[in-house]
Amino acid sequence: MGQTIIRVEHLTVGYGSQPVLNDLNFEVQPGEVFAVLGGSGSGKSTLLKHMIGLYPPIDGHIWLDGIDIATAEGATRLSALRRIGVTYQSGALFGSMTLAQNVRLVLEEYTELPDEAMNLIARMKLDLVGLKDFAESLPAEVSGGMQKRAAIARAMALDPAILFLDEPSAGLDPVTSAGLDQLILRLKRGLGVTFVVVTHELPSIFTIADRVIMLDRRARGIVAEGRPQDLRDHSDNPVVRQFFNRQAGALEMA
């Protein structure tokens, strides 16, 4: 697929000096959907927070499009972080602002575009996610699935090369979740966006993911990497097989 867009090398992450995940190594290629899997407490959200620069790693490197955000500072670090967009599990929209205003907020913060241009871009991003007719709606006036779509539109406001999605299907019914999966695939095909998706939803994993890594809290690291179908059908790791075949007890999920 070309040059690696994300490279994680010998990464140890945690909080303070207490590691949660040790010595992680993996790469993400441009234009693919890369999923991070694992049971409760396996470190999925911890890894995501470090990959988007919220916390410094205990050790190791996180290269985003050639820039190591673990060591980069100032304008160089900001340049790398401007290349990413993030959505959170709850959507994290501002309830007192319309969907268009939520998207526009990013443009107000990071650009000096005129009002007319920011309004146009906000509506274009909402149109991309199927919310053209809901630009003036408040988050409380639309469904949970629409809120997730609006959060993706906001994450795309600055045309990032990489989108990080934290549990995008959480709390959604199967039909709405399937629609969100198709949106991700459409954005991947149409815009060439690279996705890193944290999830444990098996239907979504098999629909959207080109490759996955699976984390395990007992191993404190990666126990599997590859195509989800291959891991389901051919892994010799019982923890991995039980996860992909939904067999109880494998991951001691809370």
Image (tube, helix red, strand yellow):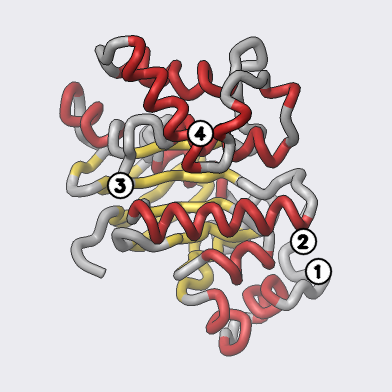
The kind of secondary structure element at disc 3 is: strand
Which residue has dot 1 on it? 249
Which residue has dot 3 on it? 62
For badge 1, the amino acid type reads Gly
Residue drawn 51% across the image and 38% down it: 152
Which residue has dot 2 on it? 252
For badge 3, the amino acid type reads Ile
Residue drawn 72% across the image and 51% down it: 176
Which residue has dot 4 on it? 126
Q: Position of residue 209 (x, y in %)?
A: 51, 66
For badge 4, the amino acid type reads Leu
Q: CA distance from mark 4 to mark 3?
A: 31 Å
Q: Nearer the viewer, residue 58 or 195?
A: 195
Q: Give the mark nearest the N terminus, 4 or 3.
A: 3
Vertical relation: 44 (above or below) 114? below
Q: CA distance from mark 4 to mark 2?
A: 40 Å
Vertical relation: 238 (above or below) 84? below
Q: Nearer the viewer, mark 1 or mark 3?
A: 3
- From the viewer's perspective, is 13 left or right of 232? left
Q: How many marks?
A: 4
Q: Nearer the viewer, mark 4 or mark 2?
A: 4
Label pair 1/2, CB-CB below 8 angstroms: yes
Q: Position of residue 210 (x, y in %)?
A: 46, 69
The kind of secondary structure element at disc 4 is: helix
Q: Nearer the viewer, residue 87 or 125?
A: 125
Q: Give the mark nearest the N terminus, 4 or 1.
A: 4
Q: CA distance from mark 3 to mark 2?
A: 29 Å
Quarter of image, res 73: top left
Q: Nearer the viewer, mark 3 or mark 2?
A: 3
Q: CA distance from mark 1 to mark 2?
A: 5 Å
Mark 4, Cα crowd under 10 Å, few <14 / some 14-19 / many 20+, is: many
